[in-house]
Amino acid sequence: MAATADMMRPPRSLWKDAWYQFQRHTLAMAGMVTLIILILGTTLGPFIYTTPINVIDFSRAIEGPSLAHPMGTDDLGRDLLARMLWGGRVSIAVGITAVVLAITLGTAFGALAGYFKKLDNPLMRVTDLFLSLPILPLLLIIIFLFRDTLRKLFGPEVGIFLMIVTVIGILTWMPVARLVRANFLSLKNKEFVEAARTVGATDARIITKHILPNVLSSVLVAATLGVGGAIILESTLSFLGLGFPSDVPTWGRLLFDAQNYLDLAPHLAIFPGLAIFLTVLSVNYIGDGLRDALDPRKGG
Amino acid sequence: MGRYIIRRLVIAIPTLLVISFVVYAILALAPGDPLSQFANNPNVPPEVRERIRESLGLNQPWHVRYVKWLLALVKGDFGYSFMSHLPVINLLIERLPNTLAVVGVAYILGIALAVPIGMISAVKRYSIFDHLATTFAFIGFSVPTFFTGLLLIILFSINLHWFPFIYDSTLKVKDFGSFIDQMKQSIMPIIVLALFDTATLARYIRAEMLEHLPLDYVRTARGKGIAERLVVIRHVLRNSLIPVVTLVALGVPAVFAGAIVTEQIFRVPGIGELLIRSISDSDTPVVAAIVFLFAVLVVLFNLIADVMYAVLDPRIRYA
Amino acid sequence: MEKRHLRRGLALAVTASIALAACTQTPTTGGSPSPGASSSAAGSFSRGQGGELKILYWQAPTILNTHQATGTKDYDAARLIQEPLASWGVDGKPVANGLAKEVPTVDNKGVSTDFTTVTWNLVSGLKWSDGSAVTADDVVFTSKYMADTDTADPNSDYMTGVKSVVATSPSVVTVTYSAPTANPYQFGTGGGNEIMQKAQFEKCLGAKASECPENLKPVGTGPYKLTEFKSGDVVTYEINTNYRDAKKPYFKTVQLKGGGDALSAARAVFQTGDVDYGWNLQVEAPVLKALIQGSSKGDYLGKASSNVERVNVNFANPDPALGDNRSEPSTKHPFFNGPDGLIVRQALAMASDRATIGDQLYGNGLTGTSTCNQLLGNDDWTSKNTASMSVCKFDPAAANKLLDDNGWAKGSDGVRAKGGIKLNVLFATTVNALRQKEQDILKANWEAVGFKVELRSIAGGVFFSNAADGANRFYYDLSMFTNGSTPDITGYMAGWTTKQIAQKSNNWNQNNYHRYSNPAYDAIVEQMRTTTDQTKLNQLGIQANDILIKDVVVIPLVNRFQVASGKSKALQGTNLNPWDSEMWNIADWYKTP
């Protein structure tokens, strides 16, 4: 019976539609492919390209790219490609995790502040407090208070990773909160919200299912910009002695170490710089594609 | 609206009190010693260091120092720097013009460039211009400022000899020649900062405009026969700028706090350079003063941003 | 921004137990002074012949009164304006290029034969830059300022042991020490002893001293006077028309700018020629070498001193589980102390490749040379015994064998262990690109013989403090930094005695961070305190040095240069001086056309 068959067909899911839309966006796909290559490269790479990252050999210092060292060597004779692959793991992980944390915090704060009038003032004043905090002394205190505990619980590497990610997260959520709040304030009084209320939707449902998807574009831009920012911020922290130990070759750190050799050995800066640039660019195009895909008006 | 503003201003006072308390606690409890410069100096034995510490008032517990500092603050006295023994307020007044001349100008330039770039990118989406602008924005964004600054120095100062890279703050602009000199010495730090600001703002403006361009009212406006350019500028842009206003307003206090890395690289004696140096020297009075003033600006500009929303978007009501 | 810089000049503890029979003693330092007027082979020029001298420091001066200042930059900036009675010369002997007519000695009756009284004759007709006359009262006032406890002058140590400073006539000052002194030039010579104008500073005594506005615009007798001072930024000077030598100085104006970093300062000297003198170019050797070799504009000036960059071993236990008792002298380090302590320490030392660090990072004589001695600065007290010690030779095979032979077996992870104790070390130093590279090299060295090394870099202001992360508390296993001896080698070597162990009860304010206690070492230092014969003193110093090296209390790496500056090729007259300020003879600087 045709009618029953029709009624039995599973409803089209929003996410399947979104994925279909996403695939039609060429640059977003290109970005996704690049990002996957970068992630796979940095996670699996060290197992395939087994040149060690910390063998010091001054006789081969500051060499340009060659067959033995495809990305050249640094001033201590260490292979750059191996270091890039190893450190890239950390950089990408930090970039993405920290941003996810910041976005979650910021969106939560912003949504609640924008939607519930009573919460607006206290939440925004908390935002003001965080915005005014002096970052460096605060970091010194946090590191000093929590480093030993984290080190004991999770081991030195994971412990510091958690600390950095948390620190970047709590330092960068504020602009997101303001942005989300701004959007909520203007969308809160729109007709579709009223309509949802009349149908009996709870506040939680209205926030998450109705308003939030419309706020997505700003949040996505913040997120994509945030990934690059997080990677760079991590390098600044290392430079100040507050981040990963100096022998962890994150991309930001490699870039930082390369600055003294800019005219002697530009390849030391070009490769990590390019890596960061590609990561940020591909995340950006993925964000573009996501926004298009999730846009309810695109007929998806 | 008037009542809203007054209410916000009244709340600002306890907010600032709490912020000042938290900030001072952080500064007092953070590890670091203003006398660490003497650490390996055999000529300054521990007893002398103790005496110096006493003369700086560092022997009292921090909550006592906080109250003293707060009371002085209310009278407009920000205390004396540990390092230069100058009144902090003098230091700030001396450095503010340098910061505004570089960081402030860069900010304005950044906004001025971001609006047209973001707009055209949105309207001509995925065109060559959009791609170029996106790539350019992401270069400006994914490379840290210490790096862009260094690249510019190597290119323009060392190789081309066009611009000096050591900022001379004694230069006084009295005629066209000295004006050109001032331009020459500030153009590189301005570019470094403006690049960053333009990149961020242009992305946000583009995103917002893309949200608005497909909306019904735009179609209506077009349908009414209004020229495309007017539609975009008078209607779409204006509406898109609302959330961007928050970013711009949020960014203003940061202008006054200076650009730490850029000021250091180019040796611009601004507030950012003073801040980072005072933090590493543990020069608490200076840091406390700068951070507190920064907090005042943050609270003030958040209020300004909120008021501007209500003015720009009639749907927003606070009261 | 860390510069382990020892202040040039002397801080001698007067040996109170010198018998009066010391009347035939020659002073242990100083000795015969060099002739007064010319401190260098000066070219002939006249005053004001030159244009502007541009100097670049990568730390900006913040205050211009050396008696309230914290850093070398402030001392140097002030030295163009304020002068002491005499300077320390290039060879460590006093030179009369200051307010004094000549350097007092026993021969010219300036120093009494019992070494308690010193008479300084001021140059006649000497004027301050504001035209008023310089009198002995100004010197007396300066001594009062330095000694006053409320004023809290960081240079107050120079007044230790001084009984009185009296103006016997308007141009003669008599300094009396409370006991015969080995260093009659302690007060009045070198940086930190600059003379202040009484009329200007007498309202700045006591608690008001710190915030007195005069600190920022001192009046002096130097070749230049202040035009403008922007604290933390730039100082501009112009010729002091009242300067005593009418033919000097050469440059009409001087601009001393501060800020930025060392590498860009080096570029300003070597690549663009924007500045004439760049201070303390702490740049990695390969980069510095490339700049120097390629340069048509600048020359490099480097001079060694007593500074030693070294690894410090912790003899106490820094385990966080000990809570408040961490690194207290009562605890013992699990493997650097105890029955196998010496063996493990020796292995660590033998695995350390100081030659590579000295060659590759310091350019083998460019900014430093590798060394295996802790006491340096003068050939007379530098040990020649350490070169043949096994701990001073780079021999990882021997290190491995030593550990293998003593039961420290390598586990499956490559880390040696014995009796459940693993050789895990936490190695900390300051944030500094050069130091991080040293750490990388040492980490590779030590891991090759079975240690597991975790690196940490700590901001300078925190590392050099009593904070929990500080070098004093030593809450890690190994640390690394630099300092060096002054001519008072006794004071320096005393830094490893039991009495100077840093611990909670003295707020970690002492110098023996290692918590090292060795009665034999203490005995030698005690002997040094009572020795008056310089040769014997030097030998004892060598003995003490040898103990420290043999016992692997420290692992010296590099003898770092004191001065490592750059100047433009046309600039002449600079005379590098490791014992006093780099600006000590600025009146003699000139440019060839």
Image: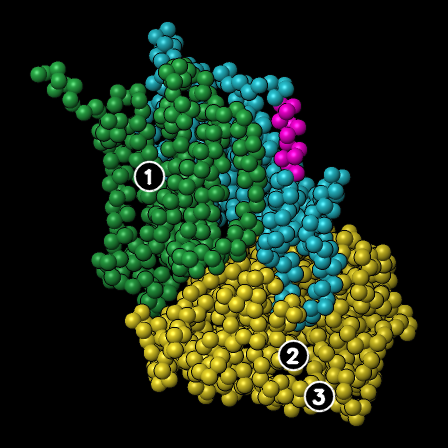
Q: Which residue is mark 3?
A: C530
Colour yellow maps to chain: C
Chain that appears cyan: B
Asked if C505 appears above or below B262 in the picture, the reply is: below
Percent from the top left, x then y, of residue B6? Answer: 65, 23
Judging by the rendered image, the residue that carries numbered circle 1 is A283
Q: Is residue B7 rendered magenta in the image?
A: yes
Residue at 51% in and 15% down: B314
Quadrant in the picture for the N terminus of chain C: bottom right
Residues at marks 2 and 1, CA–CA distance in whole angstroms:
61 Å
Residue at the spot of label 2: C499
**Amino acid on which disc 1 is placed:** Val
Question: Residue C13 — which label?
Answer: none
Q: SS class of the residue under badge 3?
A: helix
B121 sits to left or right of C273: left
Label 3 – label 2 distance at C-alpha: 17 Å
* SS state under label 2: helix
Whether C88 is drawn above or below B241: the answer is below
**Marks 1 and 3 share the same chain:** no
Q: Residue at x 63, y 88 (%)?
A: C523
Q: Which chain is green?
A: A
What colouring does the structure picture have?
Answer: by chain
Stretch in magenta:
B5-17
* Quadrant in which the C terminus of chain C appears: bottom right
Name the residue located 27 percent from the left edge and 52 percent from the top edge.
A43
Q: Residues within 10 Å of mark 1 (few under 14, many from 20)?
A: many
Name the outermost residue toward the left. Answer: A1
The picture places residue B53, in percent across and down from the top left corner, at 71, 60
Majority secondary structure in the magenta region:
helix
Q: Secondary structure at mark 1?
A: helix
